[in-house]
Image: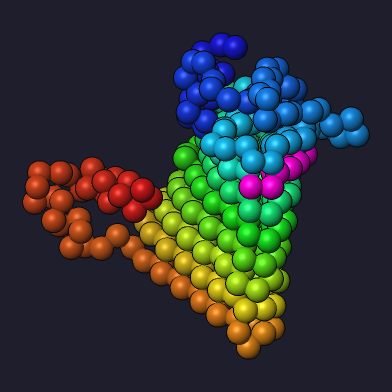
């Protein structure tokens, strides 16, 4: 791998040298490196592009890395990755995609990830998106995540769009059974004429199923973001969706909530706050010696932490 490859891997997956754990690295539409462990196996699909990741039951505190990098223009890559998390396993999955495009051709990656969580399993899933390159070709990322949780399992998702992505549609669909939990933390910043859309669709089917979604968005210059959420409560359970956004310049953010209670015991909440950077925050930082631009950058950085 060259320096561009290594920089992308560091940005999206924190890889900087030797990787401790199982991994599969995909570059420009092809797998280039793979390592498995005694408890985590990675198998190439035979019927379509992608891999199956099998985590044995009772696996504890292991990590698997599945980053994707694109360094050429004109790449249109779709991959199907299925995760089978064994009973009572505890695992961290580091995904994400980085695109470096210095051409006038668009480059696109769509990762379709499906999780099958067995009873009592705990999964942390981290996905970062990053774009770089001075070409006029767009850098497009459209991830789809599907989650099927069995009794007592839980999943934690952290998604971050760092910078440089021209267009992104992120879709997450989850079906939660008895005593399961899904928590999501999303952070997105857009600038220029970038566009980002997020769609959450969660079904709380089992007794005491719970979900908590927090989205933090910053849209500056002429960028546009859309946030759609749908939480359906079909049993005794709890759903809380929170969308907080800062807009600047001509940035636009739209939040579209839908909460559907099909059971009298379903407790569903949606909160949305969209506004500009508060003047008193700017003034306070500027009195400490920061100019207006640096003060705004510090406020945005703190908001997205």
Specify start and end residues of the magenta stretch as a single range: 79-88
**Of 154 and 279, which appears nearest the observer?**
154
Is residue 290 on the magenta stretch? no
Residue at image position (58%, 25%) is 21
**Of 135 and 195, which appears nearest the observer?**
195
**Picture coordinates of residue 222 (x, y %)?**
47, 52
How is the structure coloured here? rainbow
Residue 168 in view here: no
**Picture coordinates of residue 90 (x, y %)?**
58, 43
Side of 128 where 287 appears, left or right: left
Q: How many marks?
A: 0
Up/down of 250 relative to 113, above or below: below
Up/down of 191 relative to 152, above or below: above
Residue at image position (55%, 50%) is 157
For this orientation, the residue located farthest to the top is 2
Side of 295 where 59 appears, left or right: right
Residue at image position (15%, 57%) is 283
Up/down of 203 relative to 69, above or below: below
**Picture coordinates of residue 212 (x, y %)?**
52, 64
Residue 41 in view here: yes
Residue at image position (48%, 59%) is 215
Question: What type of secondary structure mainly makes up the magenta span?
Answer: strand
Is residue 83 on the magenta stretch? yes
């Amino acid at each position: 791998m060259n320096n561009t490859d290594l920089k992308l891997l560091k940005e999206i997956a924190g890889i900087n040298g030797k990787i401790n754990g199982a991994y599969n690295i995909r570059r420009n539409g092809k797998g280039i490196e793979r390592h498995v462990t005694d408890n985590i196996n990675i198998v190439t699909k035979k019927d379509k592009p992608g891999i199956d990741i099998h985590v044995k039951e009772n696996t504890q505190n292991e990590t698997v890395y599945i980053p994707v990098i694109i360094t050429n223009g004109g790449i249109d890559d779709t991959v199907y990755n299925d995760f089978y998390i064994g009973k009572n396993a505890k695992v961290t999955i580091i995904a994400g995609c980085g695109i470096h495009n210095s051409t006038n051709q668009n480059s696109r990656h769509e990762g379709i990830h499906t999780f099958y969580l067995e009873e009592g399993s705990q999964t942390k899933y981290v996905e970062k998106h990053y774009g770089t390159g001075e070409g006029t070709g767009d850098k497009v990322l459209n991830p789809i995540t599907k989650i099927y949780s069995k009794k007592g399992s839980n999943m934690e998702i952290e998604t971050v769009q760092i910078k440089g992505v021209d267009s992104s549609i992120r879709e997450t669909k989850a079906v939660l059974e008895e005593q399961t939990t899904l928590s999501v933390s999303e952070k997105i910043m857009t600038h220029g004429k970038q566009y980002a859309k997020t769609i959450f669709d969660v079904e709380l089917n089992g007794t005491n199923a719970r979900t908590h979604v927090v989205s933090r968005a910053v849209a500056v210059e002429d960028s546009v973001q859309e946030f759609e959420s749908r939480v359906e409560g079909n049993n005794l359970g709890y759903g809380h969706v929170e969308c907080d956004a800062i807009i600047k310049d001509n940035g636009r953010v739209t939040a579209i909530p839908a909460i559907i209670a099909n059971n009298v015991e379903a407790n569903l909440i949606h909160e949305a706050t969209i506004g500009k950077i508060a003047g008193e925050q700017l003034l306070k930082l500027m009195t400490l010696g920061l100019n207006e631009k640096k003060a705004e950058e510090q406020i945005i950085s703190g908001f997205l932490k």
